[in-house]
Image (cartoon, rainbow, N blue to C red):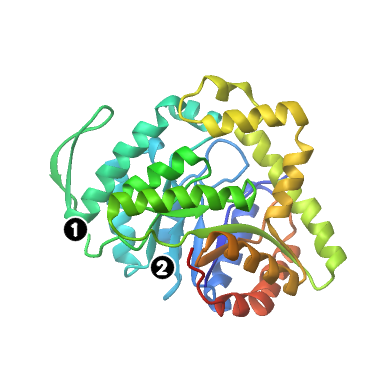
Amino acid sequence: MRVGMTCIFEGHENATDEEVWRNDLRLADLAEPLGFDSLWSVEHHFTSYTMSPDVLQFLTYMAGRTERIQLGSGVVILPWHNPIRVAEQVAVLDIVSGGRFVFGLGRGLGRIEFEGFGIPMSESRERFVEAAQIIMTALETGILEYDGKYYQIPRRELRPQPTRGFADRLYAAAVSPESVRIMADIGAGILINPQKDWMEVAEDLAAYRARYKEYKGVDAPPPLVTGWVCCDEDPIKARDMAQEYIGGYYEYVLNHYELGGRHFDTTMGYEYYQRLARSIQKHGSDRVVNNFIELQIWGTPDQCLDRIVAIQEKVGNDGFNGVFNFAGMSPEVAEKNLRLFAAEVMPRVKALPPVRL
């Protein structure tokens, strides 16, 4: 199994924004020497939830600081961008990195972000599909051209010309069944950010694989799984870390995305989140926070490995991307977490044979 590291640049009250960035950059510089296969980051705007407004900018910077490690976007939110500019940035990043870029894309969820860009959330699905078609066609053919509902592009060349295909380097974030179907249609692998029971995820993936096979005529690629990691030699300390840091992180998720909000009731394309919001309104947030903690990777090195193996058995992923610094961890705690996982867990994860479902 491939193993990656994800930097999310989450702000907190114990550090300035610049300190947060410098701390995560320091950890990012450790990814290659510690033996990770890939380095990832995210895209978010306007709050300290994650302060990474331009994932391609960060990855281009890291391309110049690394030699072999793959560089993944987890993800570029297409409705918030001009697809021409995304295609150009991706073409440049792939050239300067020597073909090490893994393109992850998504359609977004945060109302504060959509409103900040002046884009109605109800348009996200259609905008995503159009933008993905524009970008992927340009990266495959070198030509920008489109006449759609939201984007009209006269025929132009993409320069610099892309020199490598993305057929095996394209992933999309998907949680809801609606998004999973869209990702199958565009030919993307699935990048899983766990928010619901793994058996539910397995059911969604079965539908995705069937649709992918129908549309593309080949089997879908195995998914990649992202997980929030709290690893310590002491199982009690690791459990306490999970409660404090993983639980604290998900409370920030609930706030940033307003997951208990009623706006999902009137927002087209977010049916899954309508149901989640009603559950939170009925039962409160404690249940979903505890459920999120149980989905993640925490415990001793042996326990962390067991959790990763259990996930692979259910969803058949061939990659795991760990988040090691979040929810106000001190630099010392984050680095120890990262180094222990890299030394004691990662070699055994890399040795795991594939599971085909």
Mark 2: which secondary structure?
loop
* Most distant residue in the top direction: 266
Give how far across and how far down residue 307 sits, in percent: 68, 65
Query: Gap between marks 2 and 1, in whole Å?
Result: 20 Å
Q: Quadrant of residue 171?
A: bottom left
Mark number for residue 161? 1
Please report the residue visible at 33 percent of the width from the left and 45 percent of the height from the top: 185
Give how far across and how far down residue 310 sits, in percent: 65, 65
Q: Name the amino acid, label 1.
A: Gln
Please report the residue visible at 84 percent of the width from the left and 68 percent of the height from the top: 235
Let me know if residue 14 appears in the view. Answer: no
Mark 1: which secondary structure?
loop
Please report the residue visible at 45 percent of the width from the left and 53 percent of the height from the top: 190
Contact? badges 2 and 1 (CB < 8 Å): no
Q: Name the amino acid, label 2.
A: Gly
**Image label count:** 2
Q: Is residue 327 left or right of residue 175?
A: right
Query: Which is closer to the viewer, label 2 or label 1?
Result: 1
* Most distant residue in the left direction: 155
Give how far across and how far down residue 172 sits, in percent: 43, 50
Disc 2 residue crowd, few under 14, some 14–19, many 20+, Cα 10 Å: few
Let me know if residue 106 appears in the view. Answer: yes
- Quickly name the residue at label 2: 64
Please report the residue visible at 51 percent of the width from the left and 55 percent of the height from the top: 41
Identify whether 172 is placed above or below 102: above
